[in-house]
Image (spheres, helix red, strand yellow):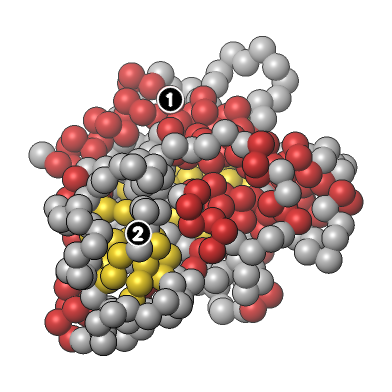
Amino acid sequence: MGKKKKRVEIEAETNNPENSLTETETNPSLLNGDSHKKKKKKKTRAEKETNSEAKADEIPTVSIAIAGSIIDNAQSLDLATRLAGQIARAATIFRIDEVVVFDNKSSSGNNGAFSTQNNSNENEGGAAFLVRILKYLETPQYLRKALFPKHNSLRYVGMLPPLDAPHHLRKHEWAPYREGVTLKERATSSVGTVVDVGLDKNVVVDQANEPGIRVTVAMGTNQNLDSDLPRQVVSSSKPREETGTYWGYKVRYASNISSVFTDCPYKDGYDHLIGTSEHGLIVNSSQLNLPAFRHLLIAFGGLSGLEKSVEEDHKLKGKNVHDIFNLYLNTCPHQGSRTIRTEEALFISLQYFQEPITRAMQRVVS
């Protein structure tokens, strides 16, 4: 079943504002390193960025898709926050490139207390909440105050363990690249922007940007912060391209499961789709052979599983999970509990896929 690749036939969604998050959730300043493209650049710089993006697209990526309904079932806001923290930790530990949070209709009929306890004027559903927490935790600590205004959903994030990702650098650490946020402060030179990169002194980059934008800065080898030598803003994929360093995950919201596929940010979409379920095929990890992929997606269902999410999506009418996914696997057979929570399944499954993914990536490189 899994060896024969199936074609996912899904109609592209129209740009319906109702399928989007609020302006806060879609604010470019909260996205990983994409916001520096906001300003128009000279042709030569645009060409460099295009070449960089093309190079980044050649690097194999692994994405995960998670149903936002897992948050709606939480019994309190602090438990929902802890759950989101577990998702962020798993994504970072296993070097996930993109986390897609999708809505599903079954989330509206949950029995949890999350929606009633999160009942301030800033109330948001489980999917939007998960997106916000995932973005917050992926952001280096020294940038959070500038990029995230106070919000009820962030009330308990202080109790979560840090991700301690490679781009979450300490003040005393020097690295070839650092994440920063543009400031209102004027640069001494006529052209340039002052950026806070979490060091004792701010740095100046060689292009003009609006304040409050997250950027990735190439620090170079000159550690003298008093120098007037401007640094360079680069794509957020540059650290991985040049040094192989994991540089965090992107976060994307999808209004339903079909939007997970149709709104894929990669040029040619995901070329291999894997669904996980207790009803899936049982294959030992050592015997699982994945094709040489460019962009792999692994999907995890909500309280009712992926089957229910597909059934509820009108764009997938007449289809089942086996029509959509190239592989539909049970990564934890012979389970002792009647149910495996999504956050548990995430750690189990990502460990299960480690060896097959490594083998597939080695075939891409060779």
Q: Circle 2 sits on which residue?
A: 201
Q: Position of residue 38 (x, y in %)?
A: 39, 79
| Nearer-the-camera pick, 272 or 365 | 365
Confirm or deny contact between disc 1 and disc 2 (CB under 8 A): no
Side (left or right) of 292 relative to 110: left
Where is residue 365 drawn, in percent x and y? 14, 41
- Residue 319 visible somewhere in the drawing: no
Label 1 sits on a secondary structure element that is helix
Q: Amino acid at mark 2?
A: Lys
* Quadrant of the image containing the N terminus: top left
Residue 294 in the figure: left or right of residue 44: right
Q: Is 92 displayed left or right of 103 in the figure? A: left
Residue at the far front in the pictured view = 226
Q: Nearer the viewer, residue 182 or 344?
A: 182
Return the residue nearer the eye: 169 or 344: 169
| Residue 46 found in image quarter | bottom left
Q: Is residue 355 visible?
A: yes
* Residue for point 57% across, 33% down: 161
Residue 271 placement (x, y as % from top left) = 34, 52
Residue located beneath label 1 in the image: 352
Q: Nearer the viewer, residue 117 or 192?
A: 192
Q: Residue furthest left?
A: 366
Where is 199 relative to 1, above or below?
Answer: below
Residue at x-position 65% and y-position 44%? 157
What is the x, y in percent for residue 89? 52, 36
Q: Amino acid at mark 1?
A: Tyr
Q: CA distance from mark 1 to mark 2?
A: 44 Å
**Residue positioned 48% across, 45% down in the render:** 64
**Residue that appears at 39% across and 42% down:** 170
Crowd rating for badge 1 (residues with CA inside 10 Å; few <14, some 14–19, many 20+): some
* First along the sequence among labels 1 and 2: 2
